[in-house]
Amino acid sequence: MDFRNANIDPFAKAATKLLQGPVFEDQEEIWRDIRQYEVELIKYFERIAIELVIDKRDGYAYLKQIELDENGTTIGLIRRIPLTYELTLVCVLLREWMQESESDNLETANLYITPKQFRDRLEMFFKEKTNELKFVKELNKHLDSCEKLGFLKALYKSPNNSDEDRYEVKRIIKARITNEELLRFKQILEDEVKSV
């Protein structure tokens, strides 16, 4: 992209979008700029202690802070958002579901879900029915949070029945919740279920 001001880098729009959150290949103009100016963007962000992560196979890119020392200190540009127990549970279950989908269904690259399908997978994680009912009531809020985090993409929102909403689980969730983290979270959740 050419700008009227020659001092503006041609990848400025892509850099700005990356600073706002993950970018996916279906954002065609930005994705094309990221791919075209990949080297320049990597160098640009490295100067401010940020790593550009691009997964060309799964079609996403995001920024990750570079740790400055062994204590994990970063420059603090990218906010770390602490997740509630419920939102962590949603993310872990989405990640596990994606892993199952990939191993069961090699032909289909994408995972599509509805809130009803998600609720059906939840039952074993609640000690009391009242906790489950509360969580189910708040499920749409948690799914909206996952959408804001870039883990879900709303494909259809029903005006009358949220059970009919349809989401695509974005593959970036694999980068944000690694296999090791998934196993650790699953063990914590299983221990919690056993203690009931």
Image (cartoon, rainbow, N blue to C red):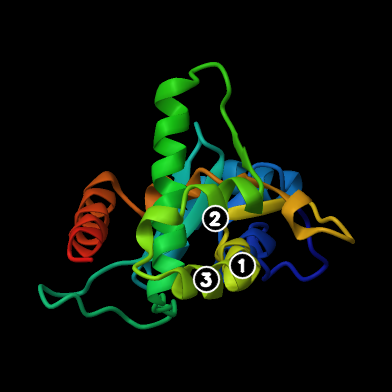
Q: Nearer the viewer, mark 1 or mark 3?
A: 3
Residue 143 percent location from the top left of the image = 60, 63
Q: Quadrant of the C terminus?
A: bottom left
Which amino acid type corresponds to the residue marked 1 in the rendered image? Answer: Lys
The image shows a total of numbered marks equal to 3
The relative height of residue 92 versus residue 69 in the rendered view (above or below) is: above
The relative height of residue 145 versus residue 158 in the rendered view (above or below) is: below
Which amino acid type corresponds to the residue marked 2 in the rendered image? Answer: Phe
Q: Nearer the viewer, mark 2 or mark 3?
A: 3
Residue 62 percent location from the top left of the image = 49, 57
**Which residue lies under the disc numbered 2?**
151
Question: Tag 1: Cα neighbours inside 10 Å, few (<14), some, or many (≥20)?
Answer: few
Q: Earlier in the sequence, mark 1 or mark 3?
A: 3
The relative height of residue 139 versus residue 110 in the rendered view (above or below) is: below
Residue 47 percent location from the top left of the image = 38, 69
Q: Secondary structure at mark 1?
A: helix
**Which residue lies under the disc numbered 1?**
148
Of residues 58 and 159, the one drawn nearer to the viewer in this rendering: 159
Q: Residue at x 75, y 47 (%)?
A: 29
Measure how far apart labels 2 and 3 are at the Cα level: 19 Å
**Which residue lies under the disc numbered 3?**
135
Q: Is residue 176 visible?
A: no
Residue 49 percent location from the top left of the image = 34, 71
Measure how far apart labels 1 and 2 are at the Cα level: 8 Å
